[in-house]
Structures are given as structure tokens and as C-alpha cells.
Image (spheres, coloured by chain):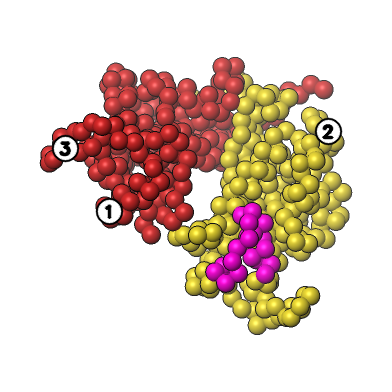
Chain colours: A yellow, B red
Amino acid sequence: QQYDPKQFDSPLVTVDAALFTYHDGVLKVLLVERASHPELGKWGLPGGFIDVHRVADLTQAINGVIEDKTGITAPYLEQLASYGNNQRDKRGWSVTVSYTALMAYQACEVRIATVADAQWVDVEQLPEMTLAFDHMTIIEAGRERLKQKALYSIVPAYALAEEFTFPELQHLHELLIGKPLQKRSFRRRIEQANLLEDTGKFRKDAGRPAILYRLAADAEQYRFVRNLED
Amino acid sequence: QQYDPKQFDSPLVTVDAALFTYHDGVLKVLLVERASHPELGKWGLPGGFIDVHRVADLTQAINGVIEDKTGITAPYLEQLASYGNNQRDKRGWSVTVSYTALMAYQACEVRIATVADAQWVDVEQLPEMTLAFDHMTIIEAGRERLKQKALYSIVPAYALAEEFTFPELQHLHELLIGKPLQKRSFRRRIEQANLLEDTGKFRKDAGRPAILYRLAADAEQYRFVRNLED
């Protein structure tokens, strides 16, 4: 039996990425200036239609979008949610499969500087912007997901450089959770679970030299039984 | 500017529901026998294409699917994940937005008995079946999601009758988590959070009469800081 998809009206299908990083002490999300209608000139998430002739699955589709803007594959990628209705896109009934991803600022710094239509934006500045489509909703859902990750795992470390200090990690967790964490308790929880490896190196910021760590193997799989606020 | 979606090859889009209930002491999932190609005659999840002329959003689409088979709206519905690739459906590149839902067996018992192609299947029997498409994967993802809900919330109660006993609730949590819970500790955690209302009624099963409870208002919003295994 032959089936002709074009016989029926079908929703448009896109993928979109809420890609976050940590830089200059703030959480940033990658935005792209739209070069075509609808919402021409507005800033929104990197994304696009699924080219069914070029990609085999959703993960390839979203990785292609992220690599196009950043030059690299995101070390942490997670499907967030799908949004679909007859209002979000003027072109018609539309579904987007959205993702949250994390990446070190340093890993894509050179590439992003060369891509004129892409830039990192401090999430605190977003309320002043009017983003394309329902992309603000997707970013908020991404932040909520990352908050849960920050409470129960060390996943946020993927937004840091490969080698990072303990204060950087704690500050990122605090930004995501939205409140301060006790330094001693945070350190003990992470040390007890062996989630970090000491690189043997140090970095001197303002004060005394801080030890540089990297993520231990499979550390992102670990889930705290009690959340880090407890 | 006019945009003609049919100008491009676009993925097929469906919604599918992994709908669970608790009955006869086991966890059951609703399966439907496929009446058309592809996978004709196989059992799979209730689902279907999005009729862009009849529904306004994804939630309406999945509610329509569930109501068509069960006669009612699921009291608990949550988006699970989207699966999309060029292999899962012989008709072409296909994306399904999948949902997990919970419903009391009693609430749809009469309707399901009249729908010839739908039946509840004990999840323990699934390994002996060959389900349509990647629906086994979706069911497994649904069970994993419900396990997390069982560890951190009272959401599983939506798979019980409106009035239920404490032992029923505990057994359902144990089925989902995959191990026994301490009765006293489970009860204390739920009582401390005021998640249940005493209906003032009793039910006599095998032993002494058991108190009948119902969910307190907004109980499904509550999250335990420490999971119920802790």
C-alpha cells in the first residue's frame, strides 16, 4: 500500500535548542537573529525545519542546528518538551521539539564571534527582549529543567570550561537554583559521590590559588537522593 | 509572504499515549489493536495523526485520542518525550509526541468493555508481545517517568479509584519503584505533607476494614525533598 503524506494537511515540524553557558559570572543563552519571515529581525533560539532528506533522527537534526552556530557538538544535550498548536507560527499548525543543551563558553568563543547573527545573552536581560515565537517559554522551561538538574546532579558543570574551580561550580548551581548553598555541605555532597577529579593544577583569580577540577567519568549520571538544598 | 508547507517534505506527526492504571494488584497499560497499515493487527498505544483542522494544540489532540478509547479525560496527563526518525514508521520520516497518563480502572471500565479493539494489559506480559512501531520504548519511558513520580510524589494515586486505601497506594508505589517500602515511613511522609483526605468511609477487603482516602487538593503538585526510598 502506498501512503502519500502530502494528501493530508500535516503540522510543520521544527527543532529548537535552548543552549546555555556560564561566563563572566552569569548564565547566558544563545540567541540568533531571524533572517527570514515570520518574525524577521527578532531574536530567538537556534532552530529550524527538519530536512528529512539529510538527517536520520531528531538528535541529528538538533545537533546540526547547534553545530552550525557554535562549530561543536554540545557535550550535554537533553530533550526538553514539544510545543505544538495553531497559534505559535503564522505559517500554520506547528510543532517544535525543543532541547536544552550546555556548552563551555571557551569551546565556541571563536566561532560565535564570527557568526554575525548569533550571540550569548545574559538570561537576566531576557525580560527586556521580545523573542520570536514562544521561545521565551522554551527558555523558561529549559531553566526550570536545569534548576532540577542543579538540585540533584552535577550536570550544570557542562556549562563550564573543561577545567573549573569549585567556587565556579557552586556559583553556577546557585544561579540555577536561585539561592545560596552552604559551601561546606555542597562540597561534602560532591566529594562523597566522587564526582570531580583533581587536575593537579591551580588557577589564581583574585585571592589565593584555586584547585582546577574536571568532571569524573559518568559523573553526569549521578543523582543525589536528597536534593542539594536539603 | 505566502508559505506553502506542501512545497517541502515534512515529517509525519502523531501523538501517542502510554495510559496506565492499577487493577487486580498489577500495573496495566492500555493497548489498541491496529486496524490499518502499517503494522496492521499488531497491538500498540492509542494514538494518531494530528488533525490540524479539528484540534488547536497537542493537548487537545492527545485528549481526543484518550477520550475516544476510554470515554473520559485522563485526570493525570503529562508529556513524556518525542521520538522522531526515518525508521520508526514505514510511511516515512515520522515524529510522535508521546504522553504518559493515569486513570482509574473503574472510571472507564464500561467503555473499554464496549471498545472491541482496546484492552488493559498487565505490564508484566508485555515482554511476550511484539508491539507496533517503537511503542515498547515509549511504554518503558513512561514507566521510568512514573517511577520518578512514585519516588518524589503522590501522582501515582491517579491510577487508583477516587477513594482508595493506604495499602493500595503503597503497593502501587512499590510496583512502580520496583522494591518494597517501609509501611511506617511511607505513611509518615505522606501524612506530614497532608497529601490525603480521610473520606470517613471504610472498605473491608480480606482483613480488617481499611480507611478510604482521597487525594487532597493540589496534592499532585507536592514534591518530596528526599525520595521515598531514602
Location of the N terminus of chain B by quadrant is: top right
Kindly indicate the quadrant of the structure image that contains residue A3. top right
Q: Quick check: do tags 1 and 2 share a chain?
A: no
Identify the residue under disc 1: B184
Q: Amino acid at mark 3?
A: Pro
Location of the C terminus of chain B by quadrant is: bottom left
Q: How many marks?
A: 3
Kindly indicate the quadrant of the structure image that contains residue A32. top right
Which chain is mark 1 on? B
**What span is colored magenta in the figure?**
A167-187
Mark pair 1, 2: CA separation? 60 Å
Q: Position of residue A187 (x, y in %)?
A: 57, 71
**Element carrying mark 2:** loop
Which chain is mark 2 on? A
Identify the residue under disc 2: A40
Q: Amino acid at mark 1?
A: Arg
**Element carrying mark 1:** helix
| In magenta stretch: residue B179 | no
Q: On the rendered structure, is B4 left or right of A110?
A: left
* Nearest the eye: B20 or B187: B187
Q: Are marks 1 and 2 in contact (CB under 8 Å)?
A: no
Identify the residue under disc 3: B209
Chief secondary structure of the magenta portion: helix
Mark pair 2, 3: CA separation? 67 Å
Which chain is mark 3 on? B
Residue located 67% across and 76% down the image: A212
